[in-house]
Amino acid sequence: MPDSTVATRSALLLRSFRKTFPSAVRGEGVYLWDAGGKRYLDFSGSAAVNFIGHGVQEIPAAMAAQGKQLEFVHSSQFTTPVAEEYAQELLDFAGKNFSEGCVYFTCGGSESIETALKLARQYQVEIGQAKRYQVLSRNQSYHGATLGALSVSGNKRRRDMYVPMVLEFAHVAFPYCYRCAYDCTDGCRNCGQEYAADLEKAIEAAQGQAAAFIFEPVSGATLGAVLPPPGYLQSVAEICRRQGVLLIADEVMTGMGRTGRNFAVEHWEIAPDILVAAKGLSSGYAPLGAVIMTKRVADAIANGSGSFLHGFTYNAHPLSVAAGREVLKVLQREKLVQAADPERPGSTAAALRHALESLRDSKAVGDVRGIGLLWGVEFVADQATKKPFAPELNFAGRVGQAASKRGLLVYPMQGCLDGISGDHLLIAPPAVITAKQIEWAVERLREAIQEASAQV
Ligand SMILES: Cc1ncc(COP(=O)(O)O)c(C=O)c1O
């Protein structure tokens, strides 16, 4: 008997065998079109990737020009003008903390996280701290899909099956004000210090073996744009400095303007040793990630063994770095970081905040939080008690589907409460979105929430 499922199954291993995926054929501005001609407003920038808008022709033009000139060289044999110039431009963009530092280019977020973890370890070895190898991180965090990145991630749904395959280091509590473990009523003004103290305890429990601490300045997919409480990140940075532990800011989602600063750490005026970027770095036009390190980190290797013991065939790929370089030019020319600045009157970020806040009227909305152009909407079965929907209802997924039916793309997630239950959406539109498009998107989202609410 022929198996009828085989004939219709895609040759591509898609994200799910149970879901049908529309075929995307075109993008322009905030819109994507599928092969059937349906238009979608990309309200989540895919997965907080696109920042400059779709279909910006300068980017493929820059990639084509680079490809015609030189498509690839191996980094063990050559450097390239495009990678050298772009590295300097990125250091300048990252600010004076990274002056005279170095940049290592990869093909995405996870590769960059792997690179940062190994860089932190090598740094410690080079300065005579060979005992230090552990990388501490936080519960309810996400740092990537590769095994090293999963090891430091706290996203239960994404890591549980692979736990036997990864090294386990300490994960400390994540300050999540809407569901604060200390039950505070002052927006975590004081308990930020309690959370920071947890990190210090974990570093001490590692008995001199902690090499680094990795964190997302604003939570990404796992919790949905949860902001750090006042003073917390400053204390974390101070503890790491005092304990000889490198501070790695994972800005894969928050970097390159998304929160209204070049990098989100600038909001809290902290100076990490290593900054990791991807997603918005190329806005999705090419696979690209970057590890940006301070002079102190680069010097330790330069003055020590002299070589970073790490490498990918495609690191600093000329076509990808040409794309990233052009994206940076567009982002600066179009003043997109300013558009994402929440403190600028009349900014796109201010319009987005205002529109999303109006969703609090929906009975199923428990919290609306975020900064710049990175927002989370958390759903609850009961606003007063903050009781979540049963996970099997997949409330966020239902909202996502109802939105997609209306031509609106959002990023639904589950697990914000305890890794399994708790539903939320991530909203992260391209910075070129207009106030009118925001209004349209939020109205469709409101309808989608109503439709999902009527189903459960
Ligand atoms: C904060 C953070 N770090 C790392 C990653 C992994 O990046 P990639 O999917 O490009 O490997 C992601 C992806 O969502 C992320 O949000």
Image (tube, helix red, strand yellow):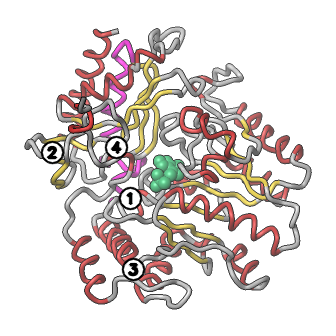
Whole-number angstrom distance, CA of label 4 to CA of label 1: 34 Å
Q: Position of residue 325 (x, y in %)?
A: 37, 74
Chief secondary structure of the magenta span?
A: helix
The question of residue 171 being in magenta is answered with: no
State the residue lying farthest toward the front.
1
Q: Which mark is residue 337?
A: 1
Q: Nearer the viewer, residue 441 or 133?
A: 133
Q: Which mark is residue 14?
A: 4
- Which span of residues is magenta-colored? 336-364
Q: Residues within 10 Å of mark 3 (few under 14, many from 20)?
A: many
Mark closer to the observer (3, 1): 3
Whole-number angstrom distance, CA of label 3 to CA of label 4: 28 Å
Residue name at image x 64 percent, y 53 percent: 148
Mark closer to the observer (4, 1): 4
Mark closer to the observer (3, 4): 4
Residue name at image x 26 percent, y 44 percent: 10
Q: Nearer the viewer, residue 402 or 12?
A: 12
Q: Nearer the viewer, residue 243 or 344?
A: 243
